[in-house]
Image (cartoon, grey):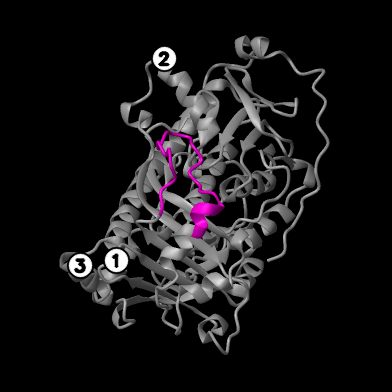
Amino acid sequence: MPPIHAPPHSILPTTNAPSFKSFRSAESSRPSNATFCSSTSIPAMGPKPSPPFKVMIIGAGVGGLFMGLCLERAGIDYVILERMPQFQIPRTTIQLSSNTLRTIEQLGLLEEVMAIAKPVSVITLRKHNMSVVGKLEATYVKERYGHYSCIVQRTEFLQILISRMPVNKILWGRYVLDIVNGDAGVQCRCANGSVEQADILVGADGAHSAVRQNLYKILQEKNQLPKSDMEPLKVAINAIVGITDPLDPERYPAVGAKFSDVNIVIGKNSPHTLWLSPTSGNRVAWSVGGALVTPEGRNDANFKQSEFGPEAIDAACVLIEDLEIPWGGTMADLIASTQRDYIKKLMVEEKHYKTWHHGRTVLIGEACHKFVPFSGQGAEQAILDVIALTNLLYRVVDNPSHQDFCIAFEAYQAQRSTIAKNAVEVSHSMSHLMNAQGLSADLKRKILFNLPAFIMNSSVDKIQVRPLLDFLPPVEDRGSKKSVKVPASS
């Protein structure tokens, strides 16, 4: 996976930018009555003839870039600020399912995304000796829900999104220092001296979101922040993740197969659980969760970047290198085939926040709901956030007031918060079950991986929303089991 370097953008002139003080105190001259369109009066399909307002997005990850692309198609002005000076190679994979692939198809990206994806055929649970405990079949989902569940390398997916937006819409090297959230709009001052402003701000900057930190500081000063939102992210376990270089299909037949047979290996009297997922390009995405080396001085404070340095990565690799893998050999073989830059050790954190917006600022993705990585829910739920929020912003009429945006944000949280919270809770339970030791955990895992098909189908049927963007031509809901109704957007 060769690195890609996005062209650096020149620093925007700031001589005409209003001062932070005047911007904060400015009052909008627009009408204060809400002019938000209801779900029964959706505007005509197609992009806006002229941009009605401007959106500033902080963070060029899955959520931020997908948001930018949706706004591009909606005809709404936007800019994405990313703190890194150039495109960074993510060293992880994402999972996409029918719930998001239908919108990806609507955007005209499905063929390109599927070219870099590997559909999942089965999830196999194994004991440490490689004996099979049970299997969850997955190929049936295409007939039932319209699309396979797929494993996609994050890098290639982000590159596709970037390629569909004008280069001047993504500003690299914009480390945000200060945010002003006023009645007339938002303004960000960056470390390089530039000042960016827009009508609203979308925080898509991840689990340790600076936008959320700024927002919560304001609410805490006003005594309006729920106590649970003041608490730090919950650390579940440690994990080490990596993606191999292309492997020899003769030595590892699983990498050359059309479908990905995902393997989960539970250690015997060991705190380590191994996940192996063949991906496109004859690679294997691997992760090991459990009691690994913890960095000195770790305090789990909110908004702290919880990654580890090279020494901790090397120490963790030593701990797991003797773990056996289903294709013969041990983890030492996969580690030897993985570049050190493609190995990351992290604290596995999770949390659902109660506060998603205030004033003209709104949060999406892991800025408001953090998932454990094994769940495959992080990117999927971020995209679902984007679909809901973009549809609501599209319904905001021209010349919107401060109250119009507040109503749209409130409707967005009402539509998405409960669903996201349930997803966090389910992913927590699954992660705990997969990493727990003892006879009770063994029995529960065996039951789960051998459930009758009708029980599994009933559970998955309930979460098949498969939403669409309101302003683009719809695509067919192909599954034999039609999607459930998405909660009203207003």
**Residue count near mark 3 (Cα–Cα under 10 Å), binned few <14, some 14–19, many ≥20:** few
Q: Which residue is mark 2?
A: 222
* The stretch drawn in magenta includes residue 313: yes
In magenta, the rendered stretch is 293-314
Give percent across and percent down for residue 142.
46, 74
Whether residue 355 is situated above or below residue 381 in the rendered picture: above
**Between 168 and 177, the one nearer to me in the picture:** 177
- Mark found first going from the N terminus, 2 or 3: 2
Whether residue 153 is situated above or below residue 85 in the rendered picture: below
- Mark found first going from the N terminus, 1 or 2: 2
Gap between marks 2 and 3 measured at Cα? 46 Å
Q: Which residue is mark 1?
A: 270
Q: Which residue is mark 3?
A: 444
* 2 vs 3, front mark: 3
**Residue count near mark 1 (Cα–Cα under 10 Å), binned few <14, some 14–19, many ≥20:** few
**At numbered mark 2, what does the secondary structure look like: helix, strand or loop?**
loop
- Mark found first going from the N terminus, 3 or 1: 1
